[in-house]
Image: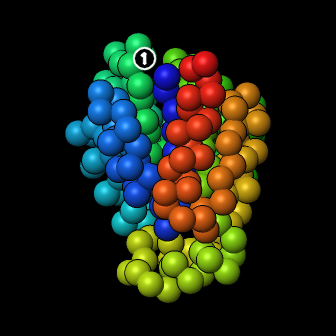
Amino acid sequence: MYIAIEGIDTAGKSTQITKLSKHFSDAIITKEPGATQVGKEIRNIVLSAKAQSNKAEFLLFLADRAEHIQEIIQPNLDKMIISDRSAVSGIAYALVQKEISKKDLLALNDFATNKIYPKKVFLLYLTQKELEHRLSQKKLDGIELRGSQYLLSIQDAIIEATELLGIELIKIDATQSRSAITQNILYNIKENDD
C-alpha cells in the first residue's frame, strides 16, 4: 500500500515517518521532493526560493515527482510505501498560487505520475496558534518565510487536492501527543487490511 504523510512545515511528518518505519520494517520510506539524485538538486533549488516564477517552481516539483514515481514508487507498488509528502502537496502549492487551472493541474500530474497516487493520505493538521508557536522555535527556510497565513492556505489546499484526486484523506490533529498520532495512523492503515 502506498500512503503519504502530508502536512505543512512543522506538522511532525518526519517524526511520524520515523515512528512508522519501526512498525513497518520492510516498508519503502521515501519523500517528495528530494528522494532521488535529481530530486535532491531540485529540492535545493526550490528551498532556496531562487525561482522567480511560480510556474517554474511548479514545473521543478513536477520534474521531481516524475523521477520519484519512476525510480521509487512504481517498482515497489507491491510493498508498503510511506512517503513524506506526495503529488498532493505539489497540487496544493499550485492551487494556492492560482496560475494553473485545476484541469491542467490534474492533467500535468497524471502525466508526471502515470496516474499513480497514494491510496491514503494522512494530513497532520495544525491550528494557526500552534503553527506560529512551532515556527518561532526554528530557523525558517524559504517556504516558511512566506508566513503562517501562506502555510495555512497550503493546509486547506491539501484537503482540496485530495478531493480533486479522489484520494482518501485522514485528517489528524497534529497537536496531540506523538504516540497518539502514530496510533491513529496505524489504526487507519490496518483498518484497510482487515
Quick one: label 1, few (<14), some, or many (20+) residues within 10 Å?
Answer: few
How many labels sit on residues?
1
Q: Secondary structure at mark 1?
A: loop
When the figure is inspected, residue 171 is found, relative to residue 64, above or below; the finding is below
Residue drawn at 56 percent across, 43 percent down: 185
Residue 190 percent location from the top left of the image:
56, 29
Q: Which residue is mark 1?
A: 77
* Camera-nearest residue between 137 and 152: 137
Residue 74 percent location from the top left of the image:
40, 18
When the figure is inspected, residue 101 is found, relative to residue 1, above or below; the finding is below
Outermost residue toward the left?
37
Q: From this viewpoint, is residue 192 visible?
A: yes
Residue 81 percent location from the top left of the image:
41, 29
* Camera-nearest residue between 178 and 48: 178
Amino acid at dot 1: Leu
Residue drawn at 75 percent across, 34 percent down: 164
Q: From this viewpoint, is residue 7 visible?
A: no
Q: Quadrant of residue 108?
A: top right
Query: Position of 189 compared to 46: left or right?
Result: right
* Camera-nearest residue between 6 and 33: 6
* Camera-nearest residue between 174 and 94: 174
Q: How is the image coloured?
A: rainbow
When the figure is inspected, residue 168 is found, relative to residue 141, above or below; the finding is above
Residue 61 percent location from the top left of the image:
46, 44
Residue drawn at 42 percent across, 17 percent down: 77
Residue drawn at 67 percent across, 80 percent down: 129
Dividing the image into 4 quarters, which one contains the C terminus? top right
